[in-house]
Image (tube, rainbow, N blue to C red):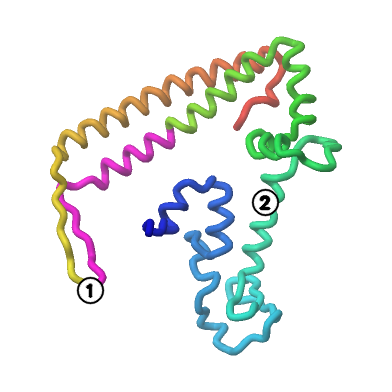
Amino acid sequence: MAKRTSFEEKNKHIHKSRKLIIDTVFGRTDDNQNVFGYEKEAEKKREVGEKWIDSDGKEWEQKEGFKINTTKMDEVREFLKKVTTCSGENCKTIQYSNADKKLIAKTGLCATCLAKKETPLRADGTWPFYEDYKITLNKLDYARDMKVQYEEALSGIKQQIEMVNEDGTFSKWQWDIDIEKVKSDLQNDINEAYDSIEALLERKLALEDKLRELNHPELIKN
């Protein structure tokens, strides 16, 4: 029988928006670690369907065998609405197609509203610069994420690691690799990430100047 995939392993491949929703609902976020846990001030037995507000101002509802943080659920619903609803002004799309949903998740606009936005940009020659600008922003986000990952890896890598066993004992593991070489490679990756970020920032500023020149400052991201 194949080994069952753990939640942590499966969770690596979940889209970050969906992961945020799942983690929030099940109380896995840093500021919501006890959504279904024990709460000292709520020791008295609650009836199913009963709602109350704790000392932190959070609203709870008792379910069959567990309670949920309805304040967080409202936030989740608002988040879901934001990432699944077209943000276009006067959007008249009644039912979203699969293509619409993908575009909304990526651009915030359905296909119709996105076309309305892009058509005048293509007509006045702005589109190539705007497309380049969007690509540059995506590359910049990626470079920043990679830099953080490299820095975390560099700060955490050790020749020897210690693990706690189920019985409370400790096991020590020795990496059969040249740690100093790995550290050097990671530092080079960090330096390259810095160089990429600097170059992308320069391109971003140049494209923003061009968008202003073309009278489209509204396209510039803060």
| Residue tagged 1 | 167
At 33% across and 25% down in the image, what residue appears?
A: 192
At 77% across and 18% down in the image, what residue appears?
A: 119
| Circle 2: element type | helix
The disc, 2 or 1, on the residue closer to the chain's N-terminal end is 2
Residue 116, by quadrant, is top right
Residue type marked 2: Leu
Q: Nearer the viewer, mark 2 or mark 1?
A: 1
Residue type marked 1: Asp
At 32% across and 43% down in the image, what residue appears?
A: 152
Relative image position of residue 33 (x, y in whole percent): 49, 66
Is the C-beta separation of discs 2 and 1 under 8 Å? Answer: no
Q: In this view, does 149 lie above or below 51?
A: above
Q: Is residue 163 above or below residue 158?
A: below
Mark 2–mark 1 Cα distance, whole angstroms, equals 42 Å
Q: Is residue 170 left or right of residue 197?
A: left
| Residue tagged 2 | 80
Q: What stretch of residues is rendered in magenta?
A: 144-167
Q: Nearer the viewer, residue 133 or 202?
A: 133
Residue 25 among those drawn in magenta: no
Q: In this view, does 23 lie to the left or right of 106?
A: left
